[in-house]
Protein backbone atom coordinates (compact mmCIF):
# COMPACT_ATOMS: atom_id res chain seq x y z
CA UNK A 1 0.00 0.00 0.00
CA UNK A 2 1.38 3.41 -0.95
CA UNK A 3 1.39 6.43 1.31
CA UNK A 4 -1.46 7.80 -0.81
CA UNK A 5 -3.49 4.61 -0.31
CA UNK A 6 -2.99 4.73 3.44
CA UNK A 7 -3.98 8.39 3.58
CA UNK A 8 -7.04 7.74 1.43
CA UNK A 9 -8.15 4.79 3.56
CA UNK A 10 -7.73 6.82 6.77
CA UNK A 11 -9.68 9.74 5.29
CA UNK A 12 -12.45 7.39 4.14
CA UNK A 13 -12.78 5.87 7.62
CA UNK A 14 -12.93 9.35 9.14
CA UNK A 15 -15.61 10.37 6.63
CA UNK A 16 -17.73 7.34 7.46
CA UNK A 17 -17.36 7.98 11.19
CA UNK A 18 -18.41 11.62 10.71
CA UNK A 19 -21.47 10.57 8.69
CA UNK A 20 -22.51 8.08 11.35
CA UNK A 21 -22.26 10.83 13.96
CA UNK A 22 -23.72 13.77 12.05
CA UNK A 23 -26.03 12.46 9.33
CA UNK A 24 -28.99 10.14 8.85
CA UNK A 25 -26.66 7.23 8.09
CA UNK A 26 -26.69 4.41 10.65
CA UNK A 27 -25.18 0.95 10.28
CA UNK A 28 -28.29 -0.38 12.05
CA UNK A 29 -30.31 0.45 8.94
CA UNK A 30 -28.04 -1.19 6.38
CA UNK A 31 -29.85 -3.12 3.64
CA UNK A 32 -28.97 -4.19 0.12
CA UNK A 33 -30.49 -5.27 -3.17
CA UNK A 34 -28.36 -7.83 -4.94
CA UNK A 35 -28.05 -10.67 -7.41
CA UNK A 36 -27.81 -14.21 -6.07
CA UNK A 37 -27.85 -17.74 -7.40
CA UNK A 38 -26.52 -21.28 -7.39
CA UNK A 39 -25.51 -24.11 -9.67
CA UNK A 40 -25.51 -27.65 -8.26
CA UNK A 41 -24.96 -31.11 -9.70
CA UNK A 42 -27.95 -33.16 -8.54
CA UNK A 43 -25.87 -36.35 -8.36
CA UNK A 44 -23.37 -34.60 -6.08
CA UNK A 45 -20.38 -35.32 -8.33
CA UNK A 46 -17.68 -32.68 -8.57
CA UNK A 47 -16.74 -31.23 -11.93
CA UNK A 48 -14.92 -28.28 -13.43
CA UNK A 49 -18.09 -27.49 -15.38
CA UNK A 50 -20.01 -26.49 -12.23
CA UNK A 51 -17.31 -24.02 -11.16
CA UNK A 52 -17.17 -22.49 -14.65
CA UNK A 53 -20.96 -22.20 -14.74
CA UNK A 54 -20.85 -20.46 -11.36
CA UNK A 55 -18.20 -18.00 -12.53
CA UNK A 56 -20.08 -17.22 -15.75
CA UNK A 57 -23.42 -16.91 -13.95
CA UNK A 58 -21.84 -14.44 -11.53
CA UNK A 59 -20.63 -12.39 -14.49
CA UNK A 60 -24.15 -12.47 -15.93
CA UNK A 61 -25.59 -10.61 -12.93
CA UNK A 62 -23.03 -7.80 -13.00
CA UNK A 63 -25.87 -5.33 -13.63
CA UNK A 64 -27.28 -6.04 -10.17
CA UNK A 65 -24.26 -4.39 -8.54
CA UNK A 66 -23.08 -0.80 -8.38
CA UNK A 67 -19.85 0.60 -9.81
CA UNK A 68 -17.75 3.40 -8.35
CA UNK A 69 -16.68 6.39 -10.43
CA UNK A 70 -13.31 4.71 -11.03
CA UNK A 71 -15.15 2.07 -13.10
CA UNK A 72 -13.57 -0.86 -11.24
CA UNK A 73 -14.56 -0.73 -7.58
CA UNK A 74 -17.76 -2.65 -6.88
CA UNK A 75 -19.95 -3.16 -3.83
CA UNK A 76 -18.77 -6.73 -3.49
CA UNK A 77 -18.99 -10.12 -5.19
CA UNK A 78 -17.98 -13.67 -4.43
CA UNK A 79 -18.38 -17.38 -4.99
CA UNK A 80 -18.70 -20.37 -2.63
CA UNK A 81 -17.49 -23.80 -3.82
CA UNK A 82 -16.36 -27.13 -2.44
CA UNK A 83 -12.71 -27.50 -1.44
CA UNK A 84 -10.79 -28.95 -4.42
CA UNK A 85 -8.77 -31.54 -2.52
CA UNK A 86 -6.22 -32.30 -5.25
CA UNK A 87 -5.44 -28.61 -5.65
CA UNK A 88 -4.86 -28.10 -1.93
CA UNK A 89 -2.84 -31.30 -1.51
CA UNK A 90 -0.40 -29.65 -3.90
CA UNK A 91 -0.42 -26.50 -1.76
CA UNK A 92 0.31 -28.61 1.34
CA UNK A 93 3.32 -30.15 -0.41
CA UNK A 94 4.59 -26.66 -1.18
CA UNK A 95 4.70 -25.96 2.57
CA UNK A 96 7.17 -28.84 2.92
CA UNK A 97 4.68 -31.37 4.28
CA UNK A 98 3.37 -34.62 2.90
CA UNK A 99 -0.44 -34.42 3.01
CA UNK A 100 -2.01 -37.15 5.11
CA UNK A 101 -4.70 -38.33 2.73
CA UNK A 102 -6.35 -40.50 5.37
CA UNK A 103 -7.14 -37.31 7.30
CA UNK A 104 -9.60 -34.65 6.16
CA UNK A 105 -8.16 -31.31 5.12
CA UNK A 106 -9.66 -28.01 6.24
CA UNK A 107 -8.97 -24.60 4.73
CA UNK A 108 -9.40 -21.23 6.40
CA UNK A 109 -9.76 -18.24 4.08
CA UNK A 110 -8.58 -15.28 6.15
CA UNK A 111 -8.49 -11.49 5.71
CA UNK A 112 -5.60 -9.87 7.62
CA UNK A 113 -4.60 -6.21 8.09
CA UNK A 114 -2.33 -5.43 5.13
CA UNK A 115 -0.38 -2.38 6.29
CA UNK A 116 0.25 -3.21 9.95
CA UNK A 117 2.72 -6.10 10.05
CA UNK A 118 2.63 -6.28 13.83
CA UNK A 119 -1.14 -6.68 13.74
CA UNK A 120 -0.74 -9.27 10.98
CA UNK A 121 1.48 -11.40 13.20
CA UNK A 122 -0.91 -10.96 16.11
CA UNK A 123 -3.73 -12.24 13.91
CA UNK A 124 -1.78 -15.29 12.76
CA UNK A 125 -0.88 -16.09 16.36
CA UNK A 126 -4.54 -15.86 17.39
CA UNK A 127 -5.63 -18.19 14.58
CA UNK A 128 -2.87 -20.73 15.20
CA UNK A 129 -3.43 -20.71 18.96
CA UNK A 130 -7.10 -21.57 18.64
CA UNK A 131 -6.51 -24.32 16.06
CA UNK A 132 -3.84 -25.95 18.23
CA UNK A 133 -5.95 -25.48 21.36
CA UNK A 134 -8.65 -27.64 19.74
CA UNK A 135 -6.02 -30.30 19.03
CA UNK A 136 -5.60 -30.08 15.24
CA UNK A 137 -2.41 -30.00 13.18
CA UNK A 138 -1.42 -26.99 11.06
CA UNK A 139 0.41 -27.63 7.79
CA UNK A 140 1.11 -23.95 7.35
CA UNK A 141 -0.07 -20.72 5.77
CA UNK A 142 -0.49 -19.95 2.10
CA UNK A 143 -0.45 -16.51 0.49
CA UNK A 144 -3.41 -16.45 -1.87
CA UNK A 145 -2.26 -15.24 -5.31
CA UNK A 146 -4.21 -12.17 -6.41
CA UNK A 147 -4.24 -9.90 -9.45
CA UNK A 148 -4.53 -6.39 -8.00
CA UNK A 149 -4.50 -4.83 -11.47
CA UNK A 150 -8.20 -5.61 -11.91
CA UNK A 151 -9.21 -3.71 -8.76
CA UNK A 152 -10.37 -0.13 -8.60
CA UNK A 153 -8.52 2.54 -6.64
CA UNK A 154 -10.78 2.39 -3.58
CA UNK A 155 -10.95 -1.40 -3.51
CA UNK A 156 -7.17 -1.65 -3.68
CA UNK A 157 -6.69 1.02 -1.01
CA UNK A 158 -8.79 -0.97 1.45
CA UNK A 159 -7.65 -4.43 0.31
CA UNK A 160 -6.73 -6.83 3.12
CA UNK A 161 -3.87 -9.31 3.10
CA UNK A 162 -5.50 -12.57 2.00
CA UNK A 163 -4.07 -15.84 3.29
CA UNK A 164 -5.17 -19.43 3.81
CA UNK A 165 -4.40 -21.67 6.76
CA UNK A 166 -4.12 -25.39 5.95
CA UNK A 167 -5.32 -27.70 8.74
CA UNK A 168 -5.28 -31.50 9.09
CA UNK A 169 -7.90 -33.51 10.97
CA UNK A 170 -5.19 -35.07 13.13
CA UNK A 171 -7.76 -36.07 15.78
CA UNK A 172 -9.50 -38.36 13.31
CA UNK A 173 -13.00 -37.16 14.18
CA UNK A 174 -15.94 -37.59 11.81
CA UNK A 175 -16.85 -34.87 9.32
CA UNK A 176 -19.75 -33.38 11.31
CA UNK A 177 -17.64 -33.12 14.46
CA UNK A 178 -14.75 -31.61 12.48
CA UNK A 179 -17.05 -28.97 10.98
CA UNK A 180 -18.60 -28.16 14.36
CA UNK A 181 -15.22 -27.78 16.06
CA UNK A 182 -13.94 -25.62 13.19
CA UNK A 183 -16.97 -23.41 13.81
CA UNK A 184 -16.07 -23.14 17.51
CA UNK A 185 -12.47 -22.36 16.56
CA UNK A 186 -13.65 -19.52 14.33
CA UNK A 187 -15.87 -18.07 17.03
CA UNK A 188 -12.99 -18.19 19.51
CA UNK A 189 -10.77 -16.46 16.96
CA UNK A 190 -13.33 -13.68 16.56
CA UNK A 191 -13.52 -13.15 20.32
CA UNK A 192 -9.74 -13.15 20.70
CA UNK A 193 -9.36 -10.67 17.82
CA UNK A 194 -11.86 -8.33 19.46
CA UNK A 195 -9.99 -8.59 22.78
CA UNK A 196 -6.69 -7.87 21.01
CA UNK A 197 -8.28 -4.92 19.20
CA UNK A 198 -7.53 -6.17 15.69
CA UNK A 199 -10.95 -5.85 14.02
CA UNK A 200 -9.37 -6.23 10.57
CA UNK A 201 -9.08 -9.99 11.15
CA UNK A 202 -11.94 -11.68 9.33
CA UNK A 203 -12.36 -15.38 8.58
CA UNK A 204 -14.32 -15.71 5.33
CA UNK A 205 -14.62 -19.47 5.73
CA UNK A 206 -13.11 -22.22 7.88
CA UNK A 207 -14.31 -25.61 6.75
CA UNK A 208 -13.34 -29.08 5.57
CA UNK A 209 -16.12 -28.96 2.97
CA UNK A 210 -16.11 -25.63 1.18
CA UNK A 211 -14.30 -22.35 0.67
CA UNK A 212 -15.36 -18.78 -0.17
CA UNK A 213 -13.59 -16.35 -2.49
CA UNK A 214 -14.99 -12.83 -2.25
CA UNK A 215 -14.09 -9.16 -2.07
CA UNK A 216 -15.00 -5.56 -2.85
CA UNK A 217 -14.99 -5.96 -6.61
CA UNK A 218 -17.23 -6.38 -9.63
CA UNK A 219 -18.74 -9.73 -10.54
CA UNK A 220 -16.56 -10.16 -13.62
CA UNK A 221 -13.40 -9.48 -11.58
CA UNK A 222 -13.74 -12.32 -9.05
CA UNK A 223 -12.10 -15.05 -11.14
CA UNK A 224 -9.53 -12.59 -12.51
CA UNK A 225 -8.60 -11.35 -9.04
CA UNK A 226 -8.36 -14.90 -7.66
CA UNK A 227 -6.41 -17.02 -10.23
CA UNK A 228 -7.09 -20.08 -8.04
CA UNK A 229 -10.59 -20.19 -9.53
CA UNK A 230 -9.16 -20.57 -13.04
CA UNK A 231 -7.13 -23.67 -12.14
CA UNK A 232 -8.52 -26.76 -13.90
CA UNK A 233 -8.20 -28.72 -10.65
CA UNK A 234 -10.75 -26.45 -9.03
CA UNK A 235 -13.77 -28.76 -9.13
CA UNK A 236 -16.99 -28.66 -7.14
CA UNK A 237 -20.49 -30.14 -7.06
CA UNK A 238 -22.00 -26.73 -6.30
CA UNK A 239 -21.32 -23.03 -6.71
CA UNK A 240 -23.19 -20.32 -4.83
CA UNK A 241 -22.53 -16.80 -6.07
CA UNK A 242 -23.53 -13.26 -5.15
CA UNK A 243 -23.24 -9.73 -6.56
CA UNK A 244 -23.86 -7.07 -3.94
CA UNK A 245 -25.70 -3.79 -4.46
CA UNK A 246 -25.46 -1.48 -1.46
CA UNK A 247 -28.54 0.72 -1.24
CA UNK A 248 -27.62 2.57 1.94
CA UNK A 249 -24.39 0.94 3.09
CA UNK A 250 -20.69 1.48 2.66
CA UNK A 251 -19.02 -1.26 0.59
CA UNK A 252 -16.50 -3.25 2.60
CA UNK A 253 -14.45 -6.34 1.84
CA UNK A 254 -15.89 -8.43 4.64
CA UNK A 255 -19.50 -7.51 3.82
CA UNK A 256 -19.20 -9.06 0.36
CA UNK A 257 -21.16 -12.29 0.03
CA UNK A 258 -21.61 -15.27 0.08
CA UNK A 259 -21.33 -15.60 3.84
CA UNK A 260 -20.42 -18.91 5.46
CA UNK A 261 -23.66 -20.71 4.61
CA UNK A 262 -25.94 -18.44 2.65
CA UNK A 263 -26.14 -15.65 0.12
CA UNK A 264 -29.04 -13.23 0.51
CA UNK A 265 -30.78 -10.75 -1.75
CA UNK A 266 -33.17 -8.55 0.20
CA UNK A 267 -33.46 -7.09 3.65
CA UNK A 268 -34.61 -8.27 7.06
CA UNK A 269 -37.17 -5.74 8.25
CA UNK A 270 -37.51 -7.37 11.68
CA UNK A 271 -33.75 -7.32 12.32
CA UNK A 272 -33.72 -5.41 15.61
CA UNK A 273 -36.34 -7.66 17.12
CA UNK A 274 -34.60 -10.79 15.85
CA UNK A 275 -31.25 -9.70 17.27
CA UNK A 276 -32.81 -8.90 20.64
CA UNK A 277 -34.61 -12.25 20.71
CA UNK A 278 -31.36 -14.07 19.97
CA UNK A 279 -29.74 -12.33 22.94
CA UNK A 280 -32.63 -13.62 25.03
CA UNK A 281 -32.31 -17.15 23.64
CA UNK A 282 -28.59 -17.21 24.46
CA UNK A 283 -29.35 -17.04 28.18
CA UNK A 284 -31.11 -20.41 28.15
CA UNK A 285 -29.48 -21.93 25.07
CA UNK A 286 -28.42 -25.54 25.57
CA UNK A 287 -27.05 -27.94 22.97
CA UNK A 288 -25.72 -31.46 23.36
CA UNK A 289 -23.70 -30.85 20.19
CA UNK A 290 -21.59 -28.10 21.75
CA UNK A 291 -21.58 -29.24 25.38
CA UNK A 292 -19.08 -27.24 27.43
CA UNK A 293 -18.13 -25.21 24.35
CA UNK A 294 -21.56 -23.53 24.19
CA UNK A 295 -20.27 -20.37 25.88
CA UNK A 296 -17.52 -20.02 23.26
CA UNK A 297 -20.03 -19.38 20.47
CA UNK A 298 -21.88 -16.56 22.24
CA UNK A 299 -22.93 -13.99 21.24
CA UNK A 300 -24.33 -15.76 18.20
CA UNK A 301 -24.59 -12.50 16.24
CA UNK A 302 -21.42 -10.43 16.18
CA UNK A 303 -21.67 -6.73 16.87
CA UNK A 304 -21.91 -4.62 13.72
CA UNK A 305 -23.23 -7.45 11.53
CA UNK A 306 -25.39 -6.53 8.55
CA UNK A 307 -28.86 -8.06 8.30
CA UNK A 308 -27.58 -10.75 5.92
CA UNK A 309 -24.58 -11.53 8.14
CA UNK A 310 -26.83 -11.77 11.20
CA UNK A 311 -29.19 -14.16 9.41
CA UNK A 312 -26.22 -16.25 8.30
CA UNK A 313 -24.88 -16.42 11.87
CA UNK A 314 -28.14 -17.82 13.24
CA UNK A 315 -28.56 -20.14 10.24
CA UNK A 316 -25.05 -21.47 10.86
CA UNK A 317 -25.53 -22.17 14.57
CA UNK A 318 -28.77 -24.05 13.84
CA UNK A 319 -26.93 -26.24 11.32
CA UNK A 320 -23.96 -26.82 13.61
CA UNK A 321 -26.36 -27.83 16.38
CA UNK A 322 -27.68 -30.64 14.21
CA UNK A 323 -30.31 -29.32 11.81
CA UNK A 324 -29.94 -29.45 8.04
CA UNK A 325 -30.12 -26.43 5.74
CA UNK A 326 -33.77 -26.90 4.63
CA UNK A 327 -34.90 -27.17 8.27
CA UNK A 328 -32.90 -24.09 9.26
CA UNK A 329 -34.51 -22.15 6.41
CA UNK A 330 -37.97 -23.34 7.47
CA UNK A 331 -37.36 -22.18 11.03
CA UNK A 332 -35.93 -18.79 10.15
CA UNK A 333 -37.81 -17.81 6.98
CA UNK A 334 -41.05 -19.84 7.01
CA UNK A 335 -43.93 -19.56 4.61
CA UNK A 336 -47.11 -17.76 5.64
CA UNK A 337 -49.00 -20.63 7.23
CA UNK A 338 -51.14 -19.57 10.21
CA UNK A 339 -53.94 -17.97 8.16
CA UNK A 340 -54.12 -20.87 5.72
CA UNK A 341 -53.64 -23.65 8.24
CA UNK A 342 -56.76 -25.49 7.05
CA UNK A 343 -55.27 -25.89 3.57
CA UNK A 344 -51.99 -27.36 4.82
CA UNK A 345 -51.37 -30.99 5.82
CA UNK A 346 -51.58 -31.52 9.56
CA UNK A 347 -47.95 -32.63 9.70
CA UNK A 348 -46.91 -29.31 8.15
CA UNK A 349 -49.01 -27.35 10.64
CA UNK A 350 -47.41 -29.21 13.53
CA UNK A 351 -43.95 -28.51 12.15
CA UNK A 352 -44.67 -24.81 11.68
CA UNK A 353 -46.21 -24.59 15.17
CA UNK A 354 -43.01 -26.04 16.59
CA UNK A 355 -40.84 -23.64 14.58
CA UNK A 356 -43.00 -20.72 15.68
CA UNK A 357 -42.57 -21.74 19.32
CA UNK A 358 -38.78 -21.94 19.25
CA UNK A 359 -37.72 -19.26 16.73
CA UNK A 360 -39.12 -15.90 15.66
CA UNK A 361 -39.41 -15.47 11.86
CA UNK A 362 -36.82 -13.28 10.16
CA UNK A 363 -39.23 -11.32 8.04
CA UNK A 364 -38.65 -9.18 4.98
CA UNK A 365 -37.86 -9.54 1.28
CA UNK A 366 -35.43 -12.42 0.90
CA UNK A 367 -34.12 -14.61 -1.90
CA UNK A 368 -31.72 -17.12 -0.40
CA UNK A 369 -29.13 -19.55 -1.75
CA UNK A 370 -27.91 -21.85 1.03
CA UNK A 371 -25.74 -24.86 1.77
CA UNK A 372 -24.64 -26.87 4.78
CA UNK A 373 -22.18 -28.92 2.75
CA UNK A 374 -24.65 -31.71 2.03
CA UNK A 375 -27.84 -29.86 1.09
CA UNK A 376 -27.92 -27.01 -1.42
CA UNK A 377 -31.15 -25.00 -1.42
CA UNK A 378 -32.81 -21.91 -2.84
CA UNK A 379 -35.78 -20.29 -1.13
CA UNK A 380 -37.96 -17.21 -0.76
CA UNK A 381 -39.54 -15.27 2.08
CA UNK A 382 -43.23 -15.61 2.95
CA UNK A 383 -44.24 -12.73 0.65
CA UNK A 384 -42.08 -13.71 -2.31
CA UNK A 385 -40.79 -10.17 -2.75
CA UNK A 386 -37.55 -11.14 -4.51
CA UNK A 387 -37.23 -13.25 -7.68
CA UNK A 388 -35.88 -16.80 -7.61
CA UNK A 389 -36.14 -18.67 -10.91
CA UNK A 390 -34.82 -22.16 -11.56
CA UNK A 391 -33.95 -24.53 -14.39
CA UNK A 392 -33.33 -28.27 -14.26
CA UNK A 393 -31.23 -29.60 -17.14
CA UNK A 394 -31.02 -33.00 -18.75
CA UNK A 395 -27.39 -33.40 -17.70
CA UNK A 396 -28.37 -33.19 -14.04
CA UNK A 397 -27.89 -29.57 -13.03
CA UNK A 398 -30.13 -27.35 -10.94
CA UNK A 399 -29.61 -23.67 -11.76
CA UNK A 400 -31.44 -21.15 -9.58
CA UNK A 401 -31.10 -17.43 -9.09
CA UNK A 402 -32.28 -13.89 -9.55
CA UNK A 403 -32.32 -14.11 -13.34
CA UNK A 404 -33.31 -16.53 -16.07
CA UNK A 405 -30.51 -17.40 -18.47
CA UNK A 406 -27.57 -16.87 -16.11
CA UNK A 407 -26.16 -20.15 -17.40
CA UNK A 408 -26.76 -20.62 -21.15
CA UNK A 409 -28.57 -23.91 -21.77
CA UNK A 410 -29.69 -25.70 -24.89
CA UNK A 411 -33.49 -25.49 -24.67
CA UNK A 412 -33.71 -29.06 -25.91
CA UNK A 413 -31.83 -30.19 -22.80
CA UNK A 414 -34.06 -28.34 -20.32
CA UNK A 415 -36.18 -30.73 -18.26
CA UNK A 416 -38.02 -28.15 -16.18
CA UNK A 417 -38.29 -24.41 -15.68
CA UNK A 418 -40.06 -22.53 -12.96
CA UNK A 419 -40.09 -19.77 -10.38
CA UNK A 420 -40.38 -20.20 -6.65
CA UNK A 421 -43.47 -18.74 -5.02
CA UNK A 422 -43.81 -17.09 -1.60
CA UNK A 423 -42.25 -19.22 1.13
CA UNK A 424 -41.23 -21.97 -1.26
CA UNK A 425 -37.88 -23.69 -1.66
CA UNK A 426 -36.13 -26.15 -3.93
CA UNK A 427 -33.30 -28.33 -2.64
CA UNK A 428 -30.73 -30.93 -3.64
CA UNK A 429 -29.41 -33.63 -1.32
CA UNK A 430 -25.96 -34.16 -2.84
CA UNK A 431 -25.32 -37.28 -0.73
CA UNK A 432 -28.46 -39.05 -1.94
CA UNK A 433 -28.29 -37.44 -5.39
CA UNK A 434 -31.90 -36.29 -5.30
CA UNK A 435 -33.81 -33.12 -6.17
CA UNK A 436 -36.66 -32.06 -3.88
CA UNK A 437 -39.38 -29.63 -4.89
CA UNK A 438 -41.19 -27.57 -2.28
CA UNK A 439 -43.94 -30.00 -1.26
CA UNK A 440 -41.61 -33.01 -1.29
CA UNK A 441 -39.10 -31.16 0.86
CA UNK A 442 -41.66 -30.09 3.44
CA UNK A 443 -43.10 -33.60 3.61
CA UNK A 444 -39.61 -34.89 4.42
CA UNK A 445 -39.02 -32.19 7.03
CA UNK A 446 -42.41 -32.71 8.66
CA UNK A 447 -41.70 -36.44 9.00
CA UNK A 448 -38.19 -35.91 10.39
CA UNK A 449 -39.26 -35.38 14.02
CA UNK A 450 -42.32 -36.01 16.25
CA UNK A 451 -43.59 -32.45 15.90
CA UNK A 452 -47.18 -33.40 16.75
CA UNK A 453 -46.06 -34.73 20.14
CA UNK A 454 -44.04 -31.62 20.82
CA UNK A 455 -46.70 -29.09 19.85
CA UNK A 456 -49.25 -30.93 21.99
CA UNK A 457 -47.43 -29.47 24.98
CA UNK A 458 -47.74 -25.88 23.73
CA UNK A 459 -50.37 -23.66 25.34
CA UNK A 460 -52.23 -21.45 22.88
CA UNK A 461 -52.64 -18.12 24.66
CA UNK A 462 -55.11 -16.85 22.04
CA UNK A 463 -57.66 -19.51 22.93
CA UNK A 464 -57.15 -18.99 26.65
CA UNK A 465 -57.64 -15.24 26.40
CA UNK A 466 -60.42 -15.24 23.80
CA UNK A 467 -63.18 -15.45 26.42
CA UNK A 468 -61.94 -12.47 28.38
CA UNK A 469 -63.61 -9.09 27.93
CA UNK A 470 -62.05 -5.74 28.66
CA UNK A 471 -64.02 -2.61 29.42
CA UNK A 472 -62.94 0.32 27.19
CA UNK A 473 -61.46 3.32 28.98
CA UNK A 474 -63.21 5.85 26.75
CA UNK A 475 -66.37 5.77 24.66
CA UNK A 476 -68.54 8.03 22.53
CA UNK A 477 -67.76 11.74 22.36
CA UNK A 478 -64.87 11.47 24.82
CA UNK A 479 -63.19 8.80 22.69
CA UNK A 480 -63.69 10.87 19.50
CA UNK A 481 -62.25 13.97 21.18
CA UNK A 482 -59.11 12.09 22.17
CA UNK A 483 -58.74 10.54 18.71
CA UNK A 484 -58.91 13.98 17.09
CA UNK A 485 -56.36 15.33 19.58
CA UNK A 486 -54.02 12.45 18.73
CA UNK A 487 -54.35 13.10 14.99
CA UNK A 488 -56.18 9.93 13.96
CA UNK A 489 -57.69 9.99 10.47
CA UNK A 490 -60.83 8.26 9.20
CA UNK A 491 -58.63 5.96 7.11
CA UNK A 492 -56.63 4.86 10.16
CA UNK A 493 -59.78 4.21 12.16
CA UNK A 494 -61.48 2.24 9.39
CA UNK A 495 -58.59 0.45 7.71
CA UNK A 496 -55.97 -0.05 10.43
CA UNK A 497 -57.59 0.03 13.87
CA UNK A 498 -60.96 -1.47 12.93
Image: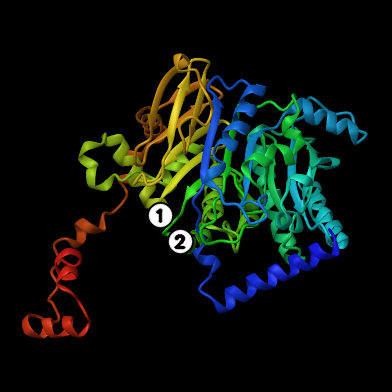
Residue 379 figure quarter: top left
What residue is shown at x 47% (from left), y 39% (from top)? 402
Mark 1, other Cα within 10 Å: few <14 / some 14–19 / many ≥20: some
Q: What element does badge 1 sit on?
A: loop
What residue is shown at x 32% (from left), y 37% (from top)? 348
Residue 94 shown left or right of residue 302 in the figure: right
Image quarter where the N terminus lies is bottom right
Q: Which residue is mark 2?
A: 277
What residue is shown at x 31% (from left), y 51% (from top)? 458
Residue 136 visible in rendering: no
Q: Nearer the viewer, residue 249 or 423?
A: 249
What residue is shown at x 52% (from left), y 55% (from top)? 285
Callouts 1 and 2 close, C-beta under 8 Å: yes
Residue 340 in the image, given as x and y percentages of width and height? 23, 43
Q: What element does badge 2 sit on?
A: helix
Marks 1/2: CA distance?
8 Å
Residue 140 in the image, given as x and y percentages of width and height? 86, 41
Tag on residue 360? 1
Residue 382 shown left or right of residue 322 in the figure: left
Q: Nearer the viewer, residue 141 or 173?
A: 141
Residue 109 shown left or right of residue 310 in the figure: right
Q: Nearer the viewer, residue 466 or 370?
A: 370
Amino acid sequence: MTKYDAEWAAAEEARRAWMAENSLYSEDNEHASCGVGLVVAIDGKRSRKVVEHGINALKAIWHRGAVDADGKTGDGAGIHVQIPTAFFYDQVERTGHTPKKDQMLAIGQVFLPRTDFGAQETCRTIVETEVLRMGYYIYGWRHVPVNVAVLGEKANATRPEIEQILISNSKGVDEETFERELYVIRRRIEKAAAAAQVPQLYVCSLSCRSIIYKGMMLAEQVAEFYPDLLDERFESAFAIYHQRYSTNTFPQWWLAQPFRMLAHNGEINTLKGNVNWMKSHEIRMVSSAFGEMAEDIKPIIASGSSDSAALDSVFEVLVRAGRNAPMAKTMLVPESWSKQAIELPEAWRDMYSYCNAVMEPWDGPAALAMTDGRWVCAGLDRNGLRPMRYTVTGDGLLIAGSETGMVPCDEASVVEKGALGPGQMIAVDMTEGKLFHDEEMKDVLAASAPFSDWVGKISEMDSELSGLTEKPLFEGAELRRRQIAAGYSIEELEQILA
